[in-house]
Amino acid sequence: MNMPDIESPQASRSITIGSQRISIEDVLQVARHQHGVTLSSTATFKARIDKGAAFLESLLANNGTVYGVNTGYGDSCTVTVPADLVNELPLHLTRYHGCGLGAYLDDEATLAVLVCRLNSLAQGYSGVRWQLLQQLSSLINHRILPNIPEEGSVGASGDLTPLSYVAAALIGEREVRYQGRLQPATEVLQSLNIPLLTLAPKEGLAIMNGTAVMTGLACLAWQRAEYLTRLCCRITAMAQIALLGNRGHFDPRLFAAKPHAGQNEAAAWIFSDIVEESGEVIRLQDRYSIRCAPHVIGVARDALGWMRRDIENELNSANDNPLIDPDAGVLLHGGHFYGGHIAFAMDSLKNAVANLADLMDRQLALLVDSKYNHGLPQNLSGSEGHRAAINHGFKAVQIGTSAWTAEALKLTMPASVFSRSTECHNQDKVSMGTIAARDCLRVLELTEQVAAALIMAAVQGVTLRQQVSPGKPSGLTKPVSEFIATTSPHSAFLDEDRPLEAELRALTGLIRHQHWELYPNA
């Protein structure tokens, strides 16, 4: 029996699930921008879902053996479950995995996870019923968010423990976040007249035995990293302007000789942000953190391409076990729950992003040091005259930035090589993909903090440069001028020392929410 149609508060703007591949941007539209989801209305899609569930039901009715349906799980796959207990088995699976610890996934991450799991089950290989897809859609559209602890997955056999909290929410167990409050799942579902789901024999395994948590986090990480590469180009241009650098280091003719696409893209953006030089170049060759910025940023830009490919392939895959081919009428046992592609992408992305942190940390070090900043005040202090002796400008910010950078660099140790044999050596080689994705998000957070500090310092440096070197630079490009104008209200010119925590947090938030439109015609 299908669930009754429940009006969705997000129905006017929705992503269709089941008719075509979805993208990272589709996941983010739901996770960040209040879009909902709609199950495809095509007859072939619903027929495929129904056919898979019917095949599984027929197989059981004819005494077929299906892993995790009438057998135990994992190392217990040789244990036959008595027929009268088969219907209870999925409930036990959800309950004994309710042992997650650590912080809870935020609303954005939780929604991304739900979309990833729904889209995977909608591939039609998992043997779930139509009403399960409807129930997952209802969680998304009503923003009923399972309270998911982020620790406890080894990233093979799927994100079992964190996804058990999704399964529990569907059946009205544990707690969910709804309208800003943590509430019992059963109370929220009943208040919205959403019937509690009774899991069919394979449905607990289908929900939990997949890569949705690591994939959802990877979607968020990819998009934040993509934005950071653009922001790093804009900040590099401002640092170059403040340091009276050599615009020629970013000349398209130079980069035509080394055709890495992302590197050329970064160089072109920086080049476009800087006005043509007038007068003598202070230093023939700028230090590497300026001169080689396109080469550092370009690695990340180029890597984002293959990372998108792998993340979106995982997003649009059936990744539980066993799979059902409803057309051929066969059961397929395998290991698609193994999150190796996401693990490698996230381990690689955190490396590329940490390099951005290191690059920006070095640029800040040049800006604040009067031995290297070509005539700017020590620590970029805007204080003058008698009071200059007691003002310290960005001295402590530079220390903090080095701390954040060091922590980001420390986290680049790949998680995927730390496979641990678990579950009686059944899960003896695991991906650690969820840990890699969590590490990557932490590296992104730290790097966004570094970027916030460098934005403040670069804006201060450009402002000071216009004061101490009239006519140098001769002017600012429109994009840089507009960037400075929209940043200044959040962090005023620093003359007298003041606590900067609130301003750093504000700018970090603007970066996280991608406040600035950067290189829109690229």
Image (cartoon, helix red, strand yellow):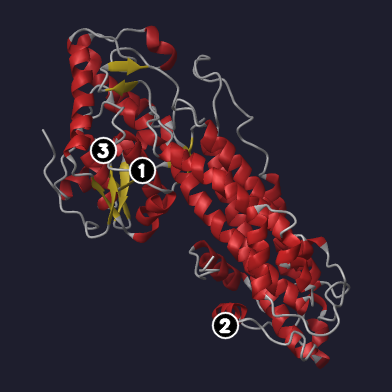
Is residue 457 something one can see in this rendering? Answer: no
The mark nearer the N terminus, 2 or 1, is 1
**Residue nearest the viewer, comparing 121 with 173:** 121
Q: Do residues under tags 3 and 1 come within 8 Å of each other at their CB atoms?
A: no
Which quadrant of the figure has residue 59? top left
Which quadrant of the figure has residue 484? bottom right
The answer to whether 444 appears left or right of 296 in the picture is left
The answer to whether 112 appears left or right of 266 in the picture is left
**Which residue corresponds to mark 2?**
485
**Residue nearest the viewer, comparing 513 with 289:** 289
Rendered location of residue 510, percent (x, y): 52, 68
Quadrant of the drawing holding the C terminus: bottom right
For the point 67% across and 52% down, the residue is: 260
For the point 50% across and 65% down, the residue is: 514
The answer to whether 407 appears left or right of 378 in the picture is left
Rendered location of residue 176, percent (x, y): 31, 46
**Residue nearest the viewer, comparing 263 with 348:** 263
Can you tell which of label 2 and label 1 is closer to the viewer?
1
**Which residue corresponds to mark 3?**
170
**Which residue corresponds to mark 1?**
21
Mark-to-mark CA distance, 3 and 1: 25 Å
For the point 28% across and 13% down, the residue is: 70
Rendered location of residue 374, percent (x, y): 85, 78
Name the amino acid, label 2.
Ala
Name the amino acid, label 1.
Arg
The mark nearer the N terminus, 2 or 3, is 3
Quadrant of the drawing holding the N terminus: top left
Q: Secondary structure at mark 3?
A: helix
**Residue nearest the viewer, comparing 56 with 426:** 56
Name the amino acid, label 3.
Leu
